[in-house]
Image (cartoon, rainbow, N blue to C red):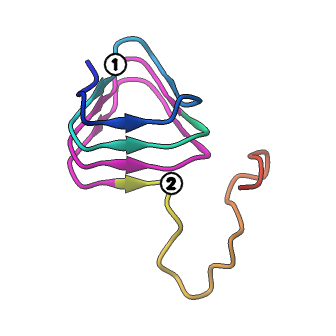
Amino acid sequence: MIHPSAIIDPTARLAEDVSVGPFTVIGPQVEIGAGTVIGPHVVIKGPTLIGRYNRIYQFSSIGEDPQDKKYQGEIACRTCPRR
C-alpha cells in the first residue's frame, strides 16, 4: 500500500508489496525490495538499493549527502552512476 500523500519518482522501482507511509519522498534511482515497510516522513534519495524485508522507521533519511564538511559530492558506490 502506498499512502496518497507519499511522493514517489516515476523512475523509482518498488516491489509490488512495498508499503509506503504518508509524507514519504522516494526519489529517482531508488530500488526497494519485496516485503519492505517504509514509515511516514521518510526521505530516500538515489542511487540507493534497499533489499527485501526491511523496516524503515519514521523520519529516516537514506541516501542523502552526509553532514561532513570534507564531503565533496563523491559517491560511495564505484559502480553507481554520478548524480
Q: Is residue 38 one of those drawn in magenta?
A: yes
Disc 2: which residue: 63
Q: Could you tell me residue 19's position as x and y percent?
A: 28, 24
The residue at the point 42 percent across, 24 percent down is 52
Disc 1: which residue: 35
Against 19, is 17 above or below?
above
Disc 1 or 2, which lies upstream in sequence? 1
Q: Is residue 32 one of those drawn in magenta?
A: yes
Q: Which mark is residue 50?
A: none
Q: Could you tell me residue 67's position as x and y percent?
A: 47, 78
Q: For numbered disc 1, what is the local secondary structure?
A: loop
Give the quarter of the image for residue 82: bottom right
- The N terminus, quarter of image: top left
Which amino acid, by three-letter code, is at mark 1? Gly
Which of the two marks, 1 or 2, is nearer to us in this view? Answer: 2
Against 34, is 57 above or below?
below
Identity of the residue furthest to the top in this view: 16
The residue at the point 37 percent across, 38 percent down is 7
Q: Could you tell me residue 24's position as x and y percent?
A: 30, 43
Give the quarter of the image for residue 13: top right
Q: Could you tell me residue 12's position as x and y percent?
A: 54, 31
Mark 2 closeness class: few <14, some 14–19, many ≥20 residues within 10 Å: some
What is the magenta range? 31-60
Q: Main secondary structure of the magenta part?
A: loop
Against 59, is 22 above or below?
above
Which amino acid, by three-letter code, is at mark 2? Gly
**CA separation, marks 1 and 2?**
20 Å
Q: For numbered disc 2, what is the local secondary structure?
A: loop
The residue at the point 37 percent across, 56 percent down is 61
